[in-house]
Image (cartoon, coloured by chain):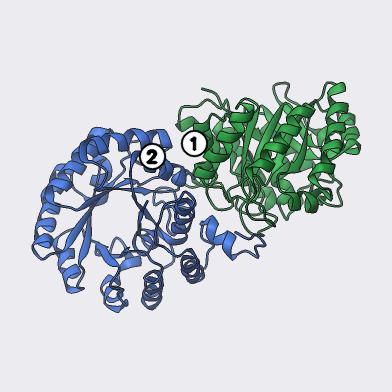
Chain colours: A blue, B green
């Protein structure tokens, strides 16, 4: 029983941290992640550095990391300009993104949902022509910081459009970490009814502590791909001080405990977590990380 | 669909905090908890103050709090000496405790499991004769800091003995926070097969972040009583720096989101959490607390 984990710490995590990590340490960090058994690492973002200064060094980072052939490295790409940088960095995989909520899409990308489709379709077409795989992200599926509730019809429509464009997988996001298991059941059962489960991933934020509970609910629906950030790196841009992504170590602990194979070495994750925690100068939220780093007398 | 929450922050939480809260602030804290809708509050412990200096003021605290008639206040009682103090404090409810693991029981209470039974039986008999309700705790059901794995037979035996003595409810504890949902399913399904679900509660620690995921698994088995600590107060005595109880705010958020009625006012919980956090001088792990206290722009 296998589960695939997509590590988004270097992107979703670092883009939501106050501290800016030096390029050489980002490279160091990703190199460590590359040795943990993780098979997917989202290493940076080609969004305009004006918006995401933390990741302004995307080109140097991607050129500087030691690429493990068993790992697929990816970066966020907002448009064809970003795609050109991704190609220059020799990436075999990229990710495009948009929202299920009209207001969030407008605020985040400055376009309506309808106007975003052709922009992403062009990226997907162009990338695919060069043999580059494209993943799709749908934000605010479970709730929007501006609109509150988001209808499932929006998420179905956006997911459908992304799959039609040719993305190989769609990551369904709880951007503000409001979801609870019943909603996860409702949303994923409908998405799976429409699209099957093989091409869907769950991207949970732990902003209200429900992240792993939601993973359990998604597993029950058949979802077998989960996004997470090492150490629980990151935060919520809409609630400064609040938590962001679920933590990779906690996810691995949960999944392995439940009998799923992740292929990931928890000890190596802990070492990478200790490293980035020191770089950031703040204690990361991952409870597994803190438990393992404590002077623990437990045999487990 | 109702779930009862047993607030153990003033006892399990505070006994595992480094900082010692002044008596007057403990009273202040419990008074705030009494106004949140919580119906069960474990307010202190009559364990020898030599072992638990944080709660040496149990007598003054219990005499000082303003008791809400809708709340059942309780305290931990290790033996008949502690019971005498509980009676002097006019408590209508107490809790006795022991472990499923022989080694943990020895280290914690200085007795074998077999030798503990008559001690607790005497407390239960004596208390019941005075109309005082007794709750039972079983520690280390899901794992022991000394022995590692603990057999389910031990937990069945100890739970059976407690119920036979006359406790009205047994709280099944993941003392070191190692459990994952499949194990929760296995353990509770066997306990419920033997004893039914009405007299069982789940006491999860969040030491590895799996607390709420385990709550979901226990709910699926029919468990409807959960212990938690406000703010995620406390820690793990076997892993200093690691997390302790699941947080009451996160538990309420999860349960209410799933459609269960807790009767608890989340805003009042947050206010109490902010108060105790300030008293302790450290940021508490509850993500709901941090999200609510942040300058959040989210409508939820």
- In this rendering, the answer to whether B92 lies above or below B289 is above
Query: Is disc 1 surrounded by few (<14), some (14 to 19) or many (20+) residues within 10 Å?
Result: many
Apparent side of residue B55 relative to residue A225 in the rendered image (left or right):
right
Count of marks, rendered view: 2
Which mark is on residue B210? none
Callout 2 crowding tier (Cα within 10 Å): few <14, some 14–19, many ≥20: some
Which residue is the site of mark 2? A220
Q: Position of residue B271 (x, y in %)?
A: 60, 38
Image position of A47 (left or right of B8): left
- Whether labels 2 and 1 belong to a single chain: the reply is no
Measuring from the top left, give residue B120's x and y in whole percent.
83, 36
Chain holding disc 1: B
Q: Nearer the viewer, residue B294 or A100?
A: A100
Residue at 35% in and 47% down: A175
- Kindly identify which numbered label has been placed on residue B254: 1
On the rendered structure, is B173 left or right of A260?
right
Instruction: Give how far across and how far down residue B204 sits, in percent.
Output: 60, 43
Q: Is residue B169 visible to the viewer in this orientation of the structure? A: yes
Q: Quadrant of residue A30?
A: bottom left
């Amino acid at each position: 029983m296998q589960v695939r984990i997509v590590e988004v710490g270097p992107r979703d995590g670092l883009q939501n941290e106050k501290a800016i990590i030096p390029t050489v340490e980002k490279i160091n960090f990703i190199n460590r992640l590359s040795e943990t058994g993780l098979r997917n690492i989202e290493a940076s973002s080609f969004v305009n550095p004006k918006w995401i200064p933390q990741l302004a060094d995307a080109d140097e980072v991607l050129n500087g990391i030691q690429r493990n052939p068993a790992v697929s490295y990816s970066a966020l790409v907002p448009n064809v300009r970003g795609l050109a940088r991704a190609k220059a960095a020799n990436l075999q995989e990229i990710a495009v993104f948009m929202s299920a909520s009209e207001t969030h899409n407008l605020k985040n990308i400055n376009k309506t949902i309808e106007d975003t489709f052709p922009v992403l379709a062009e990226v997907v077409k162009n990338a695919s022509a060069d043999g580059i795989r494209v993943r799709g992200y749908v934000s605010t599926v479970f709730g929007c910081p501006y609109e509150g509730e988001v209808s499932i019809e929006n998420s179905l429509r956006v997911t459908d459009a992304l799959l039609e464009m040719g993305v190989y997988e769609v990551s369904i996001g709880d951007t503000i970490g409001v979801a609870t298991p019943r909603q996860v059941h409702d949303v994923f059962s409908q998405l799976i009814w429409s699209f099957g489960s093989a091409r869907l991933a769950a991207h949970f934020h732990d902003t209200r502590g429900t992240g792993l509970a939601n993973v359990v609910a998604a597993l029950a629906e058949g979802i077998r791909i989960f996004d997470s950030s090492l150490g629980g790196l990151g935060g919520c841009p809409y609630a400064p001080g609040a938590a962001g992504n679920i933590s990779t170590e906690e996810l691995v602990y949960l999944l392995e405990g439940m009998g799923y194979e992740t292929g990931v070495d928890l000890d190596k994750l802990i070492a990478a977590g200790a490293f980035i925690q020191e770089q950031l100068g703040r204690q990361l939220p991952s409870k597994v990380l803190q438990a393992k780093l404590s002077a623990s007398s437990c045999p487990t």
